[in-house]
Image (cartoon, rainbow, N blue to C red):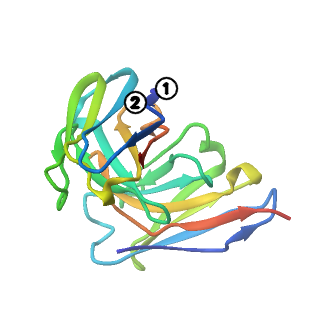
């Protein structure tokens, strides 16, 4: 139902761009559409989320570099993370928050930051 | 910032045994806002418990959640081979809006 896509390799100081295609449910439902990442061998970090009316919430530690947007015509939402470093290398998941937890996740896409 | 601390870091048990995993919050968290996930290698996390004690759809009743305020517990009554994985707790509501614990690895003894 959720499928991430985007480049698997991004150069340092560049911008990471990912898209999550949503199927089986409308982006206009009462869910929040989220990005969560997991560095290799480490735990989960919430990046941020967006609602269909473009309301958004971001992790303060990443807020200055993150933009999450929604395209209802394509039923997808996107993540942009600027000024990336090696510390941004991670498996990036999209997920939808219904209520206060995440019942549906994408399979994840690995993004490596390297020159 | 709300920090969720899970213990133990690694738990070594045998199939058939009972597992008790702890999640402690640095500030009080509403029970409605506490969830547990299971993650197996190469897979996305799977929601097990939400609202601290409600099993998600399709989750076997050997999984149960309890707790309130700053102390929450996930219990697996009788471990099956497929239960050996990493478990995360997650809270909603305190800045950051969403945080996860660092995880507990449940391994076969």
- Mark 1 surroundings within 10 Å by alpha-carbon count, few (fewer than 14), some (14 through 19), many (20 or more): few
Q: Is mark 2 on a helix, strand or loop?
A: loop
> Residue B23: x and y, percent?
36, 30
Check contact, mark 2 vs mark 1: CB within 8 A. Answer: yes
Q: Where, by quadrant of the figure, is residue A80 drawn? A: bottom right
Left or right, A36 with respect to A73, comes to right
Can residue B76 be spotted in the picture?
Answer: yes
Q: Which mark is residue A97?
A: none
| Image quarter in which the N terminus of chain A is found | bottom left
Q: Residue, x 73% and y 70% (percent of image)? A: A9
Rendered view: A21 above or below B67: below
Q: Residue B94 carries which label?
A: 2
Mark 1 sits on what residue?
Answer: B1
Of B106 and A112, nearer the camera is B106
Q: Is mark 1 on a helix, strand or loop?
A: loop
> Residue A63: x and y, percent?
59, 43
Q: Residue, x 36% and y 52% (percent of image)? A: B38
The chain carrying label 2 is B
Of A65 and B44, nearer the camera is B44
**Sequence-earlier tag: 2 or 1:** 1
The chain carrying label 1 is B
Left or right, B90 with respect to A98, comes to right
Q: Residue, x 67% and y 72% (percent of image)? A: A8
Can residue A98 be spotted in the picture?
Answer: no
């Amino acid at each position: 139902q959720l499928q991430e896509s985007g480049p698997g390799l991004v150069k340092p100081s560049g911008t990471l761009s990912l898209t999550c295609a949503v199927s089986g449910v409308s982006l206009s439902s009462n869910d929040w559409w989220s990005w969560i990442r997991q560095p290799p061998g480490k735990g989960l970090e919430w990046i941020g989320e967006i609602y269909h009316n473009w309301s958004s919430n971001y992790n303060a530690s990443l807020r200055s570099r993150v933009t999450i947007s929604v395209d209802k015509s394509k039923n997808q939402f996107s993540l942009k993370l600027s000024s990336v470093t090696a510390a941004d290398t991670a498996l990036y998941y999209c997920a939808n928050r219904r209520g206060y937890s995440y019942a549906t996740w994408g399979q994840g896409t690995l993004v490596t930051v390297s020159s | 910032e709300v920090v969720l601390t899970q213990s133990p870091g690694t738990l070594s048990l045998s199939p058939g045994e009972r597992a008790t995993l702890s999640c402690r919050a640095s500030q009080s968290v509403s029970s409605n806002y506490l969830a547990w996930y299971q993650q197996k290698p190469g897979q996305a996390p799977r929601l097990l418990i939400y609202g601290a004690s409600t099993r998600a759809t399709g989750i076997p009743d050997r999984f149960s959640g309890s707790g309130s305020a700053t102390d929450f517990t996930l219990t697996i009554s009788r471990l099956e081979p497929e239960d050996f994985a990493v478990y995360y707790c997650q809270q909603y509501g305190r800045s950051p809006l969403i945080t996860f614990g660092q995880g507990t690895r449940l391994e076969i003894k």
